[in-house]
Image: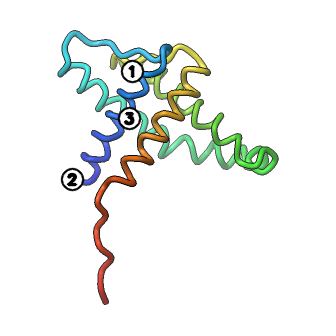
Amino acid sequence: MRFVVRLVLTALALWLATAIVGGIHLYGDSVLERFFSLVLVALVFTVVNTFVKPLIMLIGCALYVLTLGLFGLVVNALMFWLTGWVSEQLSLGFYVDGFWPAFWGAIIVSLAMWLMDLLAPRKPAAEE
């Protein structure tokens, strides 16, 4: 159940990015169709960040050190852009115009997810 809630929250964060950034587009005939598109795009986003991002981070480890972590912003933008490309290939109705919309979209999604994590109730630690 936690995974489904996290997926819906990611979909909401992606919707926020489409609402704010001009180069990120969401297509669909109805609100329900756009919602399901966002949920599927959130699933693609989760898969990309789970499997591709660690490989890029491992390969670019030296760049993280040299740029004091700022290379992470570029990696996040590339993962967002890749999500847009995969979503377009799968005809999910989500498209990212280029690097800069992906850059700003990744920042918005990261901030939105951080804020949602702060507001989400946590399970109490198990008492021993």
* C-alpha separation, residue under disc 1 versus residue under disc 2: 27 Å
Tell whether label 2 touches label 1 (CB within 8 Å): no
Left or right: residue 37 compared with residue 112:
left
Residue drawn at 41 percent across, 15 percent down: 25
Which residue is label 1 attached to?
A: 19
Q: How many marks?
A: 3
Give the vertical position of 117 relative to 74 (above or below).
Answer: below
Mark before the other along the chain sequence, 2 or 3: 2
Residue 124 is situated, as x and y percent measured from the top left of the image, at 29, 73
* Nearer the camera: disc 1 or disc 2: 1
Amino acid at circle 3: Ala
Q: Which residue is mark 3?
A: 13
Q: Quadrant of residue 79?
A: top right
Tell me which amino acid carries mark 2.
Met
Q: Residue furthest top?
A: 29
Instruction: Measure the C-alpha gap from mark 2 to mark 3.
Output: 19 Å
Q: Earlier in the sequence, mark 1 or mark 3?
A: 3
- Alpha carbon distance from label 1 to label 3: 10 Å
Tag 1, which secondary structure? helix
Taking the spot 39% from the left edge, 19% from the top edge, the residue there is: 94
Q: Residue at x 47, y 46 (%)?
A: 50
Q: Is residue 62 above or below residue 100?
A: below
Where residue 58 sits in the image (x, y, percent)? 67, 49
Q: What secondary structure is marked by label 3?
A: helix
Give whichever of 114, 3 is nearer the camera: 114
Amino acid under disc 1: Ala
Residue 53 screen position, x and y as percent: 56, 42
Label 2 sits on residue = 1
Q: Residue at x 53, y 35 (%)?
A: 107
